Image (cartoon, rainbow, N blue to C red):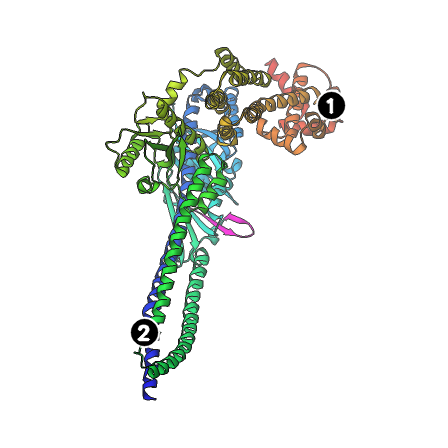
Amino acid sequence: MVIKKMNKKTMIIKFFITYFFIVLPLLFFTIIITMNTTTRMKKDVNEVLANQLNKICAQLINEYQNYEENSIRLYSRPELAENKMKSNYIRARKGIEVLEDINCNDPYTVDVFLSYGNHYIYSAMGYSKCKVHFENVLSCTKDSTLKALELMDTKENRVEVLYTDKSGYLVYHYMNRNWASSVGSSVNYCIDFDQFKLKLEQLTDRFPAYIIVTINNQEEIHFGYNEVHGLSLLTTEENLTTELKGYTVVSDAIKDMGIKIEVIYDSDQLYKNVTYNQRFNYVFITLSVLITMIVSFYVSKKRYKDIEMLEIDLKERRISKKNYEFSFVESIVNTIIFESDNWQKIAVESQKQLKRQVAMQLFYGLIKEPNEINRILESSQIELYEDYYFIGGIIIKDKDILIEEFENFLETELFCKVPINGQTAMLFLVESPNEDYLYQKRNSVVQRLIKAGKLENTGGIRIGFSQMYQNISMASYAYIEAVSTLRKMSNCQGFRKIEFWENVIKAREEVLQLPEKDVEGYVKALKEENQSDIEYWIQRMNQYIFYQIDSEENRCYLRFCMLQPLIMMVKNQDESHVKGKLVSDAIKYASSSGEEFNETINKIVFQYCKKTKKQDDFVRIIKYIDENFSRYDLSLDEVAAYSGFTKAYLSRLFKSKTGKGYSKYVTELRMNKAKKLLVETDLPIKDIVPQLGYIDVPNFRKRFKIECGMNASAYRKEYVENSNS
């Protein structure tokens, strides 16, 4: 019995020793990994916030520079010269109309005004003294008005803040150094806080934040976020005054503008998901350890009974005793480690196969939409860091390429093997920080490939590259260039071991050309924005490509040549189209089938000519109003029905084109005609009123006095007296 007790005690000791020396190190290692993962996640969150703030600062500095360029162009406008603006109101009116056009075409500015010193303001809203303009026109507070007067005397470019009772403005002040006659001349753009707030709202898309904008190290603008109103301007009493302990502060500065932006996030809210994830991992690990310990102890206890019975049997048969329990536990641990290694190898190999499948789909053009490409790359754990990329390919004569020999030297996860002219080629995508005009990046890839495969003395090697691309959705186009380059090199003895698509395309351009007459007619129709002629010349060139060109590769090239003049015209017409889907669709379908290409290019032509059609529609509407404003029953509903637009759209169209509403425009037409009839005829007022679209004389007299500042009889009398004198 004593021996049995000792064996039982020994077994328990061995169990706990084995458990703590194997499981606890794994537990400790798991906790360390969890802590590191949590730290990295917090760091990633901070980097995302900093990058978002950096993008907004880049938008602001770009806007500031654009306004500076616009102010320089204003300096050269003869209508805005100081001697003309100050001479009399009629000559100044031409300059004010220039400012009105600029202000109407810019959705972000409240007012654009010129200052010649701090005495008078020539604004898109009219002409007034400085103090009157800031107090009455812009409704600035007294302190802001004084600050604005000081700003008009400032002889350097700067940004200033002006407050109203409920909101405020950002004023971009640009000193004019070209008008030599006036030292204090300046161009000023007044931007409402609401427009500035729209840019800052991007910072609160994910998490609520408190934003402080410091101007010239003096003025602070405070914005707060709540779920009801979103981001809003705070009053002085609502400004943040407490210490920022427990908060995350992300800041950035724009030195040229003198602006500093600080974004304050609640750390508990910011890292809420990360903290929950960390706590869940700790609880899961602890429960796993306890459950494993209980199950292992129960199993060991049962095994001990089996060993005890075996020990009695061994004694009876005089068999040497063995430590069966330890061997059993050791075999279980070895089995678990072996299976874990196998699963890890299978997972790694599956991940590699997945990435190669993604590369083939991307190269073959099976996925083209940018959102879909980004989603697939993210799910495959593939990240692209640089702005540019190219696709290269390598063929080694009489040798099968082993991807394992090269993948560690390519600096990419996107590659696959394809057959070309009976030989195996490896195609791969490589990123680049620039456009690689001098082929430096691509030559460095060549050196790494030769070194990886020990190909220094190999004569049968062929390496070809596409040109540089920036949009990942055009990877299939780059793939076609790389494959075409390798095919040319395999078929032609004159090509070098290393070739670039730029050199191949030069040789192709000398042979492949569209008919010169068709190209000239096509370009002329584009300049005239004649949709029917454009579609006619496109049809002619498509017929030439289909019947005269045999190779589908050459057909794709000529289709791309056909697109170039259209893309250039779209860029010249309106830069915003270039940033939209228009040009991306054009390039994407350059390599498509003939029917799909025709359908797509006709859609692009329709969008290109649509802007001119809108201009013609508005001219037609203005002509209709000019011909019918003398009718008292002319209404916005009638004009909307005539134009085919809704009332809401017609009102926005009037505001954007004329800078005034429909009612204001019609009233000005009637008042101008009334003034003309009063001074050029002797008709009594009761006979003039029916010609102006008014029902009765009292209504006309009231409106005339509001618009002209005096009644109609006084206006006619004043004109007669001025004419006689």
Closer to us: 197 or 550: 550
Q: Is residue 423 left or right of residue 591?
A: left
Query: Of the residues shown, which amino acid type is indicated by label 2?
Result: Ile
Residue 30 seen by the camera: no
- Residue 222 colored in magenta in the image: yes
The residue to which callout 1 is attached is 631
Q: CA distance from mark 2 to mark 1?
A: 104 Å
Disc 1 residue type?
Answer: Arg
**Residue most extreme to the left:** 457
Residue on which the image places disc 2: 17
Residue 463 position within the rendered picture, expressed as x and y whole percent measured from the top left? 33, 30
Residue range in magenta is 220-232
Q: Residue at x 39, y 81 (%)?
A: 309
Q: Name the quarter where the C terminus is drawn.
A: top right
Q: Residue 329 got which mark? A: none
Dot placed on the residue nearer the N-terminal end, 2 or 1 = 2
Q: Main secondary structure of the magenta part?
A: strand
Instruction: Using the image, determine if residue 509 lies above or below residue 657.
Output: above
Q: Position of residue 156 (x, y in %)?
A: 36, 33
In the image, what residue occupies the spot 51% across and 41% down? Answer: 194
| x and y percentages locating residue 323 in the rendered image | 32, 75
Image quadrant where residue 318 sits: bottom left
Res 164 visible:
yes
Circle 2 Cα neighbour tier, 10 Å, few/some/many (<14 / 14–19 / ≥20) = few
Q: In the image, which is nearer the foreground, mark 2 or mark 1?
A: 2
Give the position of the N terminus as an image quadrant.
bottom left
